[in-house]
Image (spheres, grey):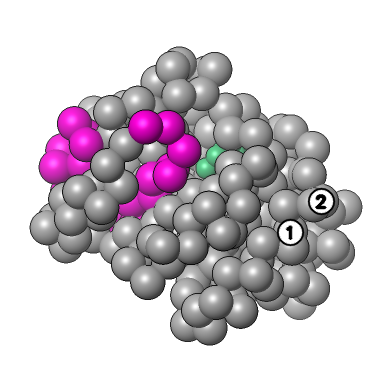
Amino acid sequence: MKVSASLLSSDLLNLEKEIEVLAEAGVSTLHIDIMDGHFVPNIAFGIDIVRQITKVSTLPINIHLMIDNPERFIDLLSSPKIGYIIVHSEGNRDIKSLFGRIKANDVNIGIALNPQTQVMDIREYLEMVDMALVMGVHPGFGGQTLIPSTLRKIKQLKDIRKDLVVGIDGGINDQTVSIVNPENPDILVVGSYLFNRDKDHELQDMREKLRILQGA
Ligand code: DX5
Ligand code: ZN
């Protein structure tokens, strides 16, 4: 089980240092939540900060686009450091052409499912994607409470496509991991739990949190 660190709750004024600690502690990938204040009721990150992060990060970066008109930004997010671009199926959009653009940039495709979206709603796209990201919370903010009924989608997705990489995003911490991990997700996207820590022992603390999340 891989842990992908959502930078939303990181110490944004010391982002480079944060990324170094995450890499040293053993996080697998970075997860950057781009929000536009329209598709979700919050604003976070943008193209220029992603570009700067790609320059310093030794870890692969996954981009989670929570924006209207995602097609405008996909070409701007092309970098060998970007592993997946994750788009939502919700909203009125031409999903297949979005996928085409992501692939044209040689990036893997992720599709995210909001809590109210069912696996059957995106069934037709599952053969076209490299990853599905189950939202454990309503997207927009870090630090929310996991909605347990979302977890069953992990198995539903795997039942349809055994080789699909399935992630779960939102509300994962030392309390909820005991109900999340038995569902066997491939990726845990974790934000506030990782960054809510003792700054004096941050590396040690981060390692301990990863150990708890991975059940090691
Ligand atoms: C929510 C974001 C998540 C979020 C996770 O809209 O997509 O990636 O930052 O944060 P926590 O782990 O705090 O729920
Ligand atoms: Zn996210």
Residue 12 inside the magenta-drawn segment: no
Does 43 sit above or below residue 199? above
The segment highlighted magenta reads 71-92
Q: Is residue 48 visible?
A: yes
Query: Amino acid type of disc 1?
Result: Leu
Q: Is residue 3 visible?
A: no
Pointer 1: what residue? 151
Identified at 42% across, 32% down, the residue is 91
Q: Quadrant of residue 15?
A: top left
Q: Is residue 66 left or right of 98 when viewed as pictured?
A: right
CA separation, marks 2 and 1?
Answer: 6 Å
Q: Is residue 166 left or right of 142 when viewed as pictured?
A: left
Does 48 sit above or below residue 81? above
Query: Amino acid type of disc 2?
Result: Pro
Q: Which mark is residue 148?
A: 2
Q: Are marks 2 and 1 in contact (CB under 8 Å)?
A: yes
Q: Is residue 155 left or right of 13 when viewed as pictured?
A: right
Ligand 1 neighbours mark 2 (CB distance < 8 Å): no
Secondary structure of the residue carrying tag 2 is helix
Identified at 45% across, 16% down, the residue is 37
